[in-house]
Amino acid sequence: MGIDAREPEISVRARRILAALLISIGLHAALIGWLRFQMIPSSALAQAPISIRLVSVKRAVQDKVKTQTQTPAPAPAPAPASNSPESADNPAKKRDRMAIKVPVQIDDTYYPTRELDVPPHPSIEVNPVYPAQAVRDNLQGWVILKMKIDYLGRVQSIDVQSADPPEIFDESSLEAFRRVKFIPAQKDGHAVNSLIQIKVSYQMK
């Protein structure tokens, strides 16, 4: 006597019932997902107002700790500067203090030539204009100028110390050196202010 090992066939009616059950399960799952999505309308999120307020340093720290214990969130914006003890150890404030550069103290002394290691000298060749009166009268002479030159090589003041003949070559000398840029004087390896005298000679050729 032989045994039929084939699996029993499912009737057409059973297949229909099984298909109906699968469709019903799928519809229920889709409905549940749609209901969850509708619980938070996107329009409510888009229209939520933004609130900005200033808080003290102490309150900002407390809010930050409270936020971290509940849900992760971005760090709050830096609070305004405060003299309270809570802000004394603020890392950002320490970085600001470290970034401040103390300006180098400038020596405002004008050193005479005898105290300079290197005296100042003009950065270009200076050619004063020979006055027309001196040319007409065939005059020669000289002018000694007293000048204050700062550590950047700029002429701060200029005066006629003496001249021979008087007042003939004065204006020509002043005009020639008033706007000249100097290479500054040197003292102990640094550029310094200087107080010098320059003799300008006028000779006919």
Image: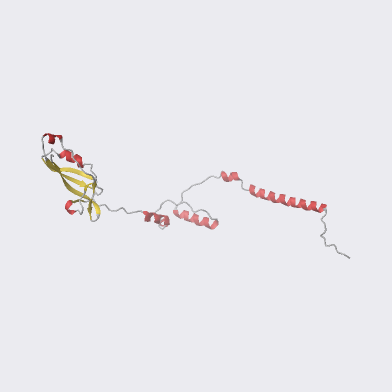
Q: Position of residue 92 (x, y in %)?
A: 42, 55
Camera-nearest residue between 140 and 171? 140
| Frontmost residue, 8 versus 92 | 8
> Horizontally, is 42 left or right of 201 in the view?
right
Q: Residue at 18% across / 48% down in the picture?
A: 196
Quadrant holding the C terminus: top left
Q: Residue at x 60, y 45 (%)?
A: 42
Q: Can you see residue 196?
A: yes
| Left or right of 82 in this view: 15 | right
| Closer to the camera in the image, 91 or 179 | 179
Q: Is residue 124 left or right of residue 144?
A: right
Is 145 placed above or below 187 here? above
Among the 4 quarters of the image, the one containing residue 163: top left
- Looking at the image, which is closer to me, 81 or 177? 177
Q: Give residue 91's quadrant in the image.
A: bottom left
Left or right relative to 153: residue 64: right
Percent of width and height locating residue 97: 37, 55
Can see residue 90? no
Give the quadrant of the N terminus: bottom right
Find residue 89 and report its horizontal and vertical position in percent. Answer: 41, 58
- Looking at the image, which residue is at 83% across and 54% down? 11
**In the rendered image, the vertical position of residue 51 relative to residue 6, given as above or below:** above
